[in-house]
Image (cartoon, rainbow, N blue to C red):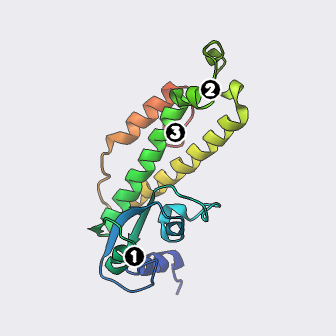
């Protein structure tokens, strides 16, 4: 007999609070800016700068931990968790899209006469880092998308993917989300 360890771990984590380890019938979703929240925020698993991170993090905790951390939360089931993760990932991808479209010009304080050179020519290192970040978010999105497909659950706002692909391709960039 072969054990699917990933599925077993997913089943355990689904009903266990990642902060205190208490088994619970329901988790609660909320956001925290506290650096220690990165330790139990599902999207922060690969983060290398958890100690000083004050960015907004989506967490799923038991009611007692959420109350202790003074988070505004709502109860979620597994589908609700996945929908929130998908939505957060979409928000990040839309941020990448806006940055590639024109935010880089202001962020990098590009002179108006140099804008025609393009992001890649003006700041190649920053451009490459942005592409890598977007690729990471796109891969994460695909994992969440595949979860919905594997569980025969309709994908929330299914037209979002097509709109994103059209916009990113329209800017001249490739995407892992299709063409």
Which mark is drawn over residue 109?
A: 2
x, y percent for residue 179? 48, 34
Which residue matches tag 3?
96
Residue labelled with disc 1: 14
Which dot marks residue 161?
none
Q: Which of 150 and 160 is in front in this view?
A: 160
Residue 49, above or below 68: above
User: Is residue 20 found left or right of 174 in the rendered image?
Assistant: left
Write the residue at 53% across / 79% down.
5
Q: Is residue 60 above or below residue 86?
A: below
* Whether label 2 touches label 3, CB < 8 Å: no
Inter-mark Cα distance, 1 to 3: 30 Å
At 38% across and 86% down in the image, what residue appears?
Answer: 23
Q: Count neighbours of disc 2 (C-alpha within 10 A) and say few if under 14, some if 14 to 19, many if 20 or more.
A: few
Q: Can residue 149 be seen in this view?
A: no
For label 1, count other residues whose C-alpha is less than 10 Å away and answer few (under 14), some (14-19) or many (20+). Answer: some
Q: From the viewer's perspective, tell me whether residue 21 is left or right of residue 45.
A: left
Residue 149, position as x, y percentages in the image = 37, 57
């Amino acid at each position: 007999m072969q054990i699917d360890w990933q599925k077993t771990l997913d089943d355990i984590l689904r009903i266990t609070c990642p902060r205190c380890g208490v088994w619970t019938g329901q988790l609660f979703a909320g956001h925290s800016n506290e650096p220690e929240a990165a330790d139990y925020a599902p999207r922060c698993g690969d983060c290398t700068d958890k100690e000083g991170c004050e960015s907004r993090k989506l967490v799923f905790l038991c009611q007692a931990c959420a109350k202790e951390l003074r988070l505004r939360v709502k109860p979620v089931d597994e589908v609700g968790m996945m929908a929130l993760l998908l939505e957060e990932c979409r928000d990040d991808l839309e941020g990448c899209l806006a940055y590639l479209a024109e935010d880089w010009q202001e962020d990098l304080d590009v002179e108006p006469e140099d804008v025609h050179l393009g992001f890649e020519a003006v700041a190649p290192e920053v451009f490459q880092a942005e592409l890598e970040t977007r690729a990471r978010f796109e891969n994460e999105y695909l994992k969440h998308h595949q979860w919905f497909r594997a569980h025969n659950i309709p994908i929330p706002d299914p037209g979002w993917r097509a709109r994103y692909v059209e916009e990113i391709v329209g800017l001249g960039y490739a995407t892992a989300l299709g063409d």
